[in-house]
Amino acid sequence: MTRKITIAAAQYNLDPFETINAYRAKITRWVEDAVGRGAEILVFPEYGAMELCSIGNKGHDLEISKGAVSDFYDDITALHQSLAKKHGVTIISGSAPDVESGRTCNVAQVFGPNGATESFTKIMPTPGEREIWDIKGGQELKVFDIGKVKFGLLICYDIEFPLLSRALAEAGAEIIIAPSDTETEWGYWRVRTGAMARALENQVYTVQAPLIGAAPFCEFTNTHYGAAGIFAPSDKGFPAGGVIAVGEANVPGWTIATLDLDAIAALREGGQVQTYKHWSEQMGAGVLPPAHVINLSQ
């Protein structure tokens, strides 16, 4: 039987809320919509949780907004864990600044279909994250095993650095997921180009899930441009341009596609090119950072 999995990438707009219950209702609607369309993996964007800074009108002060969203970390966890378990799906929640012991990181959480919970910290903060919020980078690459598939997670700027994706691919990732938050069309295309290049190099699927639209209530993430995309290597059996699905820019909603996992395995062995197999032959291939496999299927 052919192994297939359906993945949904959000083009997600930030909304202002008066209460945490309004946020819960919104996330629940989004999840139920994707599940109703057959999604098994749901991907929310980088800084998707920043809309929580609107509660109490705390988004106009950069430092206060950072801490305000971090304060909701337990609420974010409980909500997404409950929804993942209820529907038997895997959810990557919108990332948030996590403030702990004076150190701030950009953290996304991963919720397995049985309720298992893990997290991933962005490795490579952008210049803006470093200069405005003093965001620190993570040090651990992770591949998440949900039984049906293994996927790697990077956040936005991370996907523009080839060795990170290569480490995930060599640890078994068949899909590399890149939630993003880009203010401009240039930024969007940088992340998209990185995602498409990583699909080609590693012969994996890649997924981009962006923030979109304006959020004047949040100083740090007040404008966004993006379109969700699901990409494959450009080779036989796949679209010639490597684009499996792409959303209409800046329109809220899900971009959904069903991915043939066996086709990726076959491509690595019999494709017109074998970039995954031949990686080590290039000059300076060097030593890769370690990537750890996390079992979320239990």
Image (cartoon, rainbow, N blue to C red):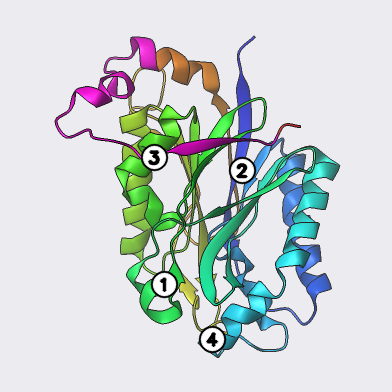
Q: Are marks 4 and 2 in contact (CB under 8 Å)?
A: no
Identify which amino acid the numbered label 2 is placed on.
Ala
On the question of residue 155 being in view, the answer is yes
Q: Which residue is pictured at 39% across the width and 40% down the height? A: 165
Identify which amino acid the numbered label 3 is placed on.
Ser
Q: Which residues are magenta?
A: 268-296
Q: Callout 1: 10 Å neighbours few (<14), some, many (20+)?
A: some
Front tag of 2 and 1: 1
| Residue 52 as seen in the image, left or right of residue 206 | right
Q: Are marks 3 and 4 in contact (CB under 8 Å)?
A: no
Q: Which residue is pictured at 72% across the width and 88% down the height? A: 56
Depth order, front residue of 254/197: 197
Q: Earlier in the sequence, mark 4 or mark 2?
A: 2
| Residue 56 as seen in the image, left or right of residue 140 | right
Answer above or below: position of 118 versus 37. below
* Separation of residues labelled 1 and 4 (CA atoms): 12 Å
Q: Which residue is pictured at 62% across the width and 28% down the height? A: 5
Q: Callout 4: 10 Å neighbours few (<14), some, many (20+)?
A: few
Q: Quadrant of the N terminus?
A: top right
Label 3 sits on residue? 165
Answer above or below: position of 17 versus 239. below
What secondary structure is marked by label 1? helix
Asked which quadrant contains residue 151, the reply is: top right
On the question of residue 241 being in view, the answer is no
Q: Which mark is residue 63?
A: 4
Identify which amino acid the numbered label 4 is placed on.
Glu
Label 2 sits on residue? 8
Q: Earlier in the sequence, mark 3 or mark 4?
A: 4
